[in-house]
Amino acid sequence: MLRTLISRLMNTFRRQRLDEECDEELRGHLEMLAERFVARGMDPVEARYAARRQFGGVTQMKEALRDRRALPPLDVLGQDARHAIRGLWHAQGFTAAAAVTLALGIGASTAVFAVLDTVVLRPLPFAEPDRLMSFRNIDRRGPHLTNISYPNFFDYRAQNRVFERLVCYRDAHFTLTDSLPAVRVPGEIVSWDLFSLLGVQPELGRSFLPEEEKAGTHVVVLSYGLWQSRFGGDRGIVGRQVHINGNSSTVVGVAPRGFQFPEDAPPMQLWTTIAEDGSMAEQRGARVTEAIGRLRRGVTPERAQAQMDQIGLALVAVDPDSNRNIAKTLVMSEQERLAGKTRRPLWIMLGAVMLVLLIACANVANLLLVRSTGRAREFSVRSALGASRWALVRQLLAESLMLGLLASAGGVLFSALSLKRVLPLAGEDIPIPRIAGVSLDLRVLAFCMAVAVVTVVLFSLAPAVQVMFTDVADALKDGAGTIARGRHRLRSSLVVGQIALGLVLLVGAELLITSLLYLVRRDPGFRPDHLLTFGIGLSDARYNTAGQIAFSDRLRERLRAIPGVKIAAAGFPLPLEGFQMGIGFDIEERPEPSGRPVSNMAIVTPGFFSAMGIPILKGRDFTERDDTGATRVLVVNEAFASRFFPGENAIGKRIEPGAMNIGEAKTMMHEIVGIVGNAKQEPLAAKADPIYYLPYKQLSWDIGTIELRTAVPPQEIVPAARAVLTGLDKEAPMFQVRTGEERAAEAIAVPRFLTILMSGFAGIALVLTVVGLYGVLSYTVARRQREIGVRIALGAGRGTVLGLVMKDAMRMVVVGLVLGVAGAVGVQRLLESISFGIRPGDPIFVIIACCLMVAASLAAAYIPALRAASVDPMQTLRNE
């Protein structure tokens, strides 16, 4: 049985050889039968005719023999495919137009799905990712999520019974000085069991041990990329000493190729233990680390959160000042945390691109209807000769399938090019998690094929239905006229649908473009022009606090001496970098019963506000005399003064920040000496957050980011600034060199990325809609050419004929706009969560989109209308 099936299958794909074998066998039977008649005394010619009459229909016999030796269903499909390929090849103009239209829709859909799949849908590349949970504290004064201090993390880790492992981690930067030039690389400070938690085995060596969390221990796991680029892939690297941040660290392992943690950060180059954080690991008020855990089997996230809440309440009693506002916790899927705010926008983008695909399907359906109208008599003749309606429909489906395969190949190419061009717009620092891993893998290609199949069904439906319900007798009698009237109505309906869907996409694009323009034009609170910023990496082992201060003074002095530099300062975090240092504080003689208020904090040098272009509204700037020997001072922004000292003059008020230098016994009161403008920390926030600034010499945590206000284009200063830094310390690398404009652009990378996507979809939709309308009107003019000729012959003027065609166009446009308005209102509500500076439900967007659609439709209708008005009545009547 199996051998027979295999033989029939092989014969199916060897049609020519099978036909030759059948011909030879039938010819042999005919010759044998003719020989019998000759033996009976017949003339050879008469014998051959008699043999043919007795044998029966040779063609029918040949088909029956082929059916017994092959697989008829596959054979029929093969015939249909060959016929479809020949038909599409002979109609190259139609094939190219339809394939390009579909390729745009399929390619755009595939590209958006590739991003959605990578960022939102794809499981984390770790063992049993569904049990990995993100763990955060909730500050009840916001409420907002907050990081965890090391002492609190140790208590959570020791006391919980719901996690197999609980791991902390935080971003950091490290300077490698084994060979020059020194390099600054991103890394992660983690608890010892990170790799065990993730189920990841190092490529070389081992992961960390519990005792390597102790202060004074310096061990490191290198990334695969750093091992290859910096150490040449030396397999003897394990056990060697490398110099990181001035300390001699032991390489204990190399991470496997492609390993990335955290998934929502730029690629990390090394991992080290929390021993690197030294005394910070003993400060409950320093909430600097994040946490991830693996649930025990059978434990639900709700149960885990309940137990962590209990531990949090107990921590309040341990240190009320630091913990009374963070007893609540949040346990959520790590996958959910990563998707975060990008989930909804990406689903919206997928919905938008599906509308584009529907418009493309409508356009191709219109093209097929035009083509099938021209083939109406062919189908009628074939039906009259015995072809079943199913056979005709099957032939149409075969052509559509070939067209879909061609379009899907073009779609894959278009999506690859789109991803290559559009993804860099998301920003170098990858503000969208995991977007750097977007690729056209098997999952995405499977989606592409599924979309192609669905589109084949959609755009084949209209012509197939027409063929199924066409009356053969009427078609043979009237030609294409009977079918054309019904198809014209269907084509007009498809154009109406295109206009409605196109209006929805236009309104969405308008919303996002307006939102992006708002973000670009609004005042960030500082002047990004003529501003250069860069980070420097000083060795903690070579520079103590006093050494860092002295180095900062020398560096800023020499940078100010560079021709073209007006001001040199330093500070961190900079505006538009987000809420990075939320530090609680007490207001003198004004205790808060609900707990210490929290505000963002920055540490800056004198001249910072002038360098950044942040105006000083009241009071003074910091000076070089504001050091640890002077009165402790600070500067606040206008939002801070308005929130915490409403109706009062904040100058002279005193607050006690919960931040102090290493080695200080307690925090100190600081006097407010200045009020500055609101420089936005959160780039997408509707209003500025409160922030207070402390002088670098009174709180020397880090040398910070250097800011240069220049009189020349900032990039011209970079070589001289690099030379100054190298002259002071050749082991101190310069990194993250950015102009102010580049920082402002990176801050709105995600809205810009979404706007470009939606605008592209709207543009494609508008073009397809205009092409569809043009096609319908062109066909209408051609079909009504005799009528138009008669009207002109009877005295109709050029304007009358133009109005006739334009009236048909506007009828479709008005119906489409009426249907699309409801969808446009809905899309406004849907996009509220990802748009900024826009009044919800503003009708101006719908009005502008309608005007744009009408203008484009009039342009599309004008050429067919002009052609109609130019009809020669004598030539038309003569042709009739």
Image (spheres, rainbow, N blue to C red):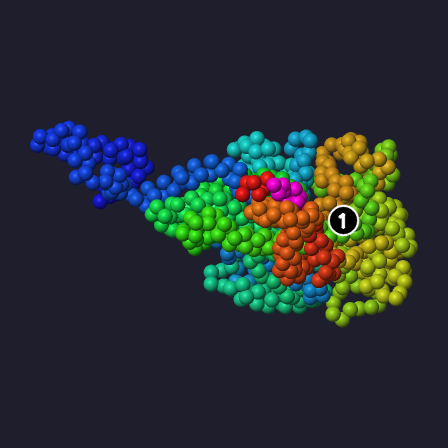
Q: What residue did someone put label 1 on?
A: 520
Q: Is residue 394 left or right of residue 195?
A: left
User: Does the magenta stretch mainly form a helix, a strand or a loop?
Assistant: helix
Question: Which quadrant: the N terminus?
Answer: top left
Residue 18: image location, x then y, percent: 27, 35
Magenta stretch containing residue 158, yes or no?
no
Q: Secondary structure at mark 1?
A: helix
Name the quadrant containing residue 712.
Answer: top right
Question: Which quadrant: the C terminus?
Answer: top right
Q: Is residue 493 left or right of residue 580?
A: left
Q: Residue at x 54, y 31 (%)?
A: 234
Magenta region: which residues?
865-874
Name the quadrant containing residue 726.
Answer: top right
Q: Residue furthest bottom?
A: 593
Residue 98: image location, x then y, percent: 53, 42
Q: Is residue 694 left or right of residue 283?
A: right
Q: Residue furthest top?
A: 44
Q: In front: 876, or 153?
A: 876
Q: Is residue 420 above or below residue 522?
A: above
Q: In front: 166, or 716?
A: 716
Q: Residue at x 49, y 44 (%)?
A: 374
* Amino acid type of the residue tagged 1 in the rendering: Val
Q: In front: 29, or 81?
A: 29
Q: Residue at x 51, y 36 (%)?
A: 92
Q: Residue furthest right?
A: 619
